[in-house]
Amino acid sequence: MEYRFLGHETADEVKPLADCSLRLGSLKDLYDVLSDGIWRAETCAPRMRSDWSDDNKTLGQCSITAFLVQDIFGGEVYGILRPGGNYHCYNVIGGRQYDLTIEQFGDEAGSLVYDDKNPQKREVHFAKEEKYQRYLLLKSLLEKAIG
């Protein structure tokens, strides 16, 4: 498989937290499982759902994926302010940046600025009930696939 997510070069080195009960060997393994049917239209942000497809699985999945990554691998979640006022979320683990959902931006991905200046809090993101429900669905689908 060809990996195009930000940080894929070192993702094999990122191991789950000691108390993680999921059978994952690395962050790259998580990406593989999510790509294999876990990311779906139902986990996509509602405003983007009509554009979601198997060819763009990461569309609308950033915040719920970033917080799931944090649950499993630790680190921090940061955001890139986007036009319209929303944040695109990514992870910083062990001082390295990882963005499992960067592919949704296609050619625009190269213009994203990862400056680690906008920490994101799950309490803020999950104040939106629909987003919290999508996170729970993503987590449940993952647990069923590999738990």
Image (cartoon, rainbow, N blue to C red):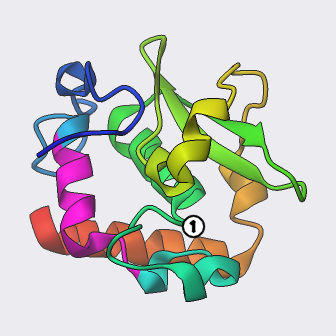
Would residue 145 be found to the left or right of residue 110 on screen?
left
Which one is in front, 110 or 119? 110
Which one is in front, 71 or 54? 54
Q: What is the three-letter code of the residue carrying label 1?
A: Gly
Is residue 64 inside the magenta stretch? no
The part of the image, by quadrant, that contains residue 108 is top right
Q: Which residue reaches farthest right?
A: 84
Q: Secondary structure at mark 1?
A: loop
Task: Residue at 14% x, 70% y: name it.
Answer: 145
**Residue 3: x, y in percent?**
24, 39
Would residue 133 be found to the left or right of residue 18 on screen?
right
Q: Is residue 27 visible?
A: yes
Would residue 65 be found to the left or right of residue 105 on screen?
left
Which one is in front, 33 or 102? 102
Q: Is residue 19 visible?
A: no
Q: Which residue reaches farthest front?
A: 107
Q: Is residue 79 above or below residue 65?
A: above
Query: What residue did someone put label 1 on?
Result: 60
Would residue 21 be found to the left or right of residue 80 on screen?
left
* Magenta residues, start to end: 29-40
> Predominant secondary structure in magenta?
helix
Which one is in front, 141 or 103? 103
**Residue 142: x, y in percent?**
25, 66
Question: Quadrant of the image for the C terminus?
Answer: bottom left
**Residue 61: x, y in percent?**
51, 63
Task: Residue at 50% x, 57% y: name it.
Answer: 104
| Dot 1 alpha-carbon crowd within 10 angstroms: few under 14, some 14 to 19, many 20 or more | many
**Residue 39: x, y in percent?**
35, 70
Q: Is residue 147 above or below residue 71?
A: below
The part of the image, by quadrant, that contains residue 29 is top left
